[in-house]
Amino acid sequence: GGVTLCRFASAIESERHTGRQGERMGDSQEQQTVPMDANHGCPGTEDANAGKAAACAGCPNQQACASEGAKGPDPDQEYIRQKLSQVKHKVLVLSGKGGVGKSTFSSQLSLSLAKAADTEVGLLDIDICGPSIPKMMGLEGEEVHQSNAGWSPVYVQDNLGVMSIGFLLPNPDDAVVWRGPRKNALIKQFLRDVDWGELDYLVVDSPPGTSDEHISLAQYLATADIDGAVIVTTPQEVSIIDVKKEINFCKKVGIKVIGVVENMSYLAMPLAEMRVEDPADPTRDVQSKFFQVLKREGLEGCTALAHVFPPTKGGAQKMAEEMQVPFLGRIPLDTKVAMAAEKGQSILDTGAGAAANAYKQVVSVIANSLGEEVTFV
């Protein structure tokens, strides 16, 4: 049931030509049981008194809750629960802040888990407006196929499948200008109709924030026994203040916080790859002298470490302690990670290094928190 792959693809193509992208927010748009902006004492959208109780007076959601479409649980929740019952572990990757490397982390987490012995992994990209996962997984230009069992994921390798709206766009440069209801419908379609088969891990990469996509995700997965969310942040306070909101969102909607990862925690760059100059005289050749010193002192294999984003108030670890959630570890800002994402490769394939070691450690901690042990092969 529901909207088919062909209809989604044709809708995207039609909107690309007509410019009619998006639609007005309908009164019957379903929300989480208690909307984030609800009044104190909200009975919940599934309650018989939704939109009618005294606590509903003046609430911005009152009209939507009072409409007929808001009553009762979504019947697709049970179908989604059954569909995902073959998935052993379901992990969301969230962040209240954009630009913290969440999609990079999601892709590398999935690739790393797939490196472990005898694992089946799926990666679901629900960043509808900014689907970067196809690029990061080396799957640009691939298309989704439909069978009697549902939508077939696009496979990076035999044990790693991927689903993203990026596979449905006729042109990867097309903007997806959709309002909430249409984005939520596609998220539901992904959860309900993708034929993952049996998986050990399903990683869900989400957009930043705590809005429509996140509310819908929490609602649709309410009965699907998700393991929880990994929260990604960078060390500086401008990121931390938004990530705190994401953690509070998870607590409010009942999603367990598996832990916090501090991404781009520090710059890790091989000394042999550094460019050195004299700011007082940029024309002065100090690069060759720098390399001479490295060679003379036997430092060519060493790595320079520096804080690009200073943790002015203690960074992610301090925040995790204050908010009483686990701290999972630090991942450096490393050119090898950037290149791996550009080429659709696993950082673990680049050999030893700060980033590869950090990912092994963080992925192992995440797996252990789920009651699993990973052995990378």
Image: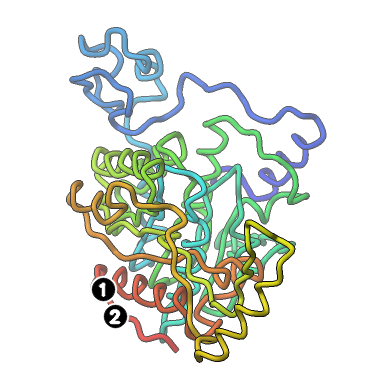
Q: Is residue 81 above or below residue 199?
A: above
265, 286: nearer the viewer: 286
- Relative to 349, 368 lies left or right: left
355 sits to left or right of 261 = right
Label 1 neighbour load within 10 Å: few <14, some 14-19, many 20+: few
Q: Residue at x 34, y 75 (%)?
A: 361
Residue holding disc 1: 368
Q: Provide residue 119's location: percent of width, then percent of height.
A: 42, 79
Of residues 17 and 311, the one drawn nearer to the viewer in this rendering: 311
Mark 1 and mark 2: Cα distance apart in space: 6 Å
* Residue at point 38%, 72% (across, down): 200
SS under mark 1 = helix
The amino acid type of the residue labelled 2 equals Glu
Q: How is the image coloured?
A: rainbow
Task: Indicate the position of residue 208 as horizontal and vertical percent values.
Answer: 46, 43
Find residue 85 and report its horizontal and vertical position in percent.
35, 62
Q: Are marks 1 and 2 in contact (CB under 8 Å)?
A: yes
Q: Position of residue 197 (x, y in %)?
A: 47, 69
Q: Earlier in the sequence, mark 1 or mark 2?
A: 1
Q: Which residue is mark 2?
A: 373
Q: Is residue 131 left or right of residue 68?
A: right
Crowding at dot 2, Cα within 10 Å, few <14 / some 14-19 / many 20+, comes out as some
Q: Amino acid at mark 1?
A: Asn
Which secondary structure, mark 2?
loop
Task: Specify the label residue 181 is tagged with.
Answer: none
Q: Which residue is drawn at the image coordinates 47% and 62% (left, top)?
A: 105
Tell me the quarter of the image containing the C terminus.
bottom left
Quadrant of res 345: bottom right
| Residue nearest the observer in this picture, 206 or 236 | 236
